[in-house]
Image (cartoon, rainbow, N blue to C red):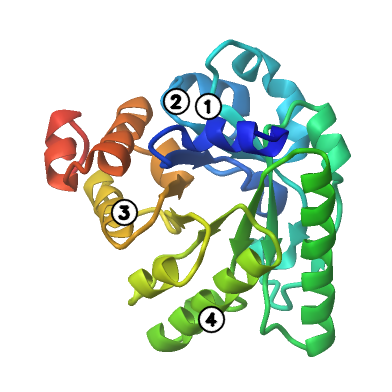
Amino acid sequence: MSGKDIRFRKIFGAENKAVVVACDHGMFDGPHHGMEDIPAMLKRLGDGPDAILMSPGMLPYCREYFGRRNAPAAIVRLNYNSVFSFKWGYRDSVISNLFQPEEAVANGADAVLVCLTMKTVSEAVDARNVEIFADLCGRAHRLGLPVVGEYFPHSHLTKAPDEFHEEILIGCRMLAELGADCIKTFYTNAFKEVTGKCPVPILGLGAEKTPTDRDALTLAEREIKDGASGVVFGRNAVQATKPAAFIQALQDICKRGAKAAAVTRKYGLSA
């Protein structure tokens, strides 16, 4: 078993399922509610997540949380993608290689996330974006780091459901072909096709904050039912009625086949 395999199993375990909490929003979109103080946020979450996705600059501030036995794994985002700067209205989906795998592993990362957006403003931008992904993926693997590939469509809120699905389907397959060990992406109207035609595990993301905890848990239930190997939830976890209980509810759904309605009642979450 290689170093990459050992680190991958730390996240996915024997069940090959993972519950990941994302708190890297400040890298693109400023401080979100509940994420102003990342170390304090992690304490509120407790040890329930299998991994935490965060920006490189925040990891050194969280040594107390991660530097313990049986702590969640640390996944560090490497590249910058302007598609995430929602408050500034960026639309070109330009990706920049800002952080290096060597820096991530030196700071204690167990895995890295590398983002890819295609069908942007030009074929030249697309080519550069995929070049950055391939470079970072190869270098991370040489260091024994698993790579979470993230496919995030350009102008994702304006695309028709069928167009959105087709791009996710093709984008996820591209990431697998380029070497991603697992993939974080959106739930689509034919998500079983995405998971069924990709040879690596797919993690469904939580996307926008839902009105209730049950709504978010229902999304997780659908993602797992349609073949996802876990979830990556950010605001829906951090801003939940009871964040630590919400994580336990996600664990029940992802690893024990629980229903959203049942775990909402079990943990006293908002319905």
Residue 224 - label: 3
The answer to which of marks 2 and 3 sits earlier in the sequence is: 2
- Identity of the amino acid at label 2? Leu
Residue occupied by mark 4:
167
Q: CA distance from mark 4 to mark 2?
A: 33 Å
| Residue 268 visible in this rendered orientation of the protein | yes
Q: Are marks 2 and 3 in contact (CB under 8 Å)?
A: no
Q: CA distance from mark 1 to mark 2?
A: 6 Å
| Residue 96 visible in this rendered orientation of the protein | no
Q: Assess disc 3: are there few (<14), some (14-19) or many (≥20) residues with their C-alpha within 10 Å of its C-alpha.
A: many
Residue sticking out furthest to the front = 1
- Identity of the amino acid at label 3? Ile
In the image, 57 versus 248, the foreground residue is 248
Q: Assess disc 4: are there few (<14), some (14-19) or many (≥20) residues with their C-alpha within 10 Å of its C-alpha.
A: many
Could you tell whether 15 is left or right of 148 in the image?
left
Q: Residue at x 63, y 37 (%)?
A: 5
Q: Are marks 4 and 2 in contact (CB under 8 Å)?
A: no
Q: Are marks 1 and 2 in contact (CB under 8 Å)?
A: yes
Quarter holding the N terminus is: top right
Residue 27 x, y percent position in the rendering: 71, 48
Residue 8 - label: none
The answer to which of marks 3 and 1 sits earlier in the sequence is: 1
Residue 41 x, y percent position in the rendering: 52, 26
Q: CA distance from mark 3 to mark 1?
A: 26 Å
Quarter holding the C terminus is: top left
- Identity of the amino acid at label 1? Met
Residue occupied by mark 1:
41
Could you tell whether 21 is left or right of 24 in the image?
left
Q: Assess disc 2: are there few (<14), some (14-19) or many (≥20) residues with their C-alpha within 10 Å of its C-alpha.
A: some
Q: Is residue 28 above or below residue 19?
A: below
Residue 45 - label: 2
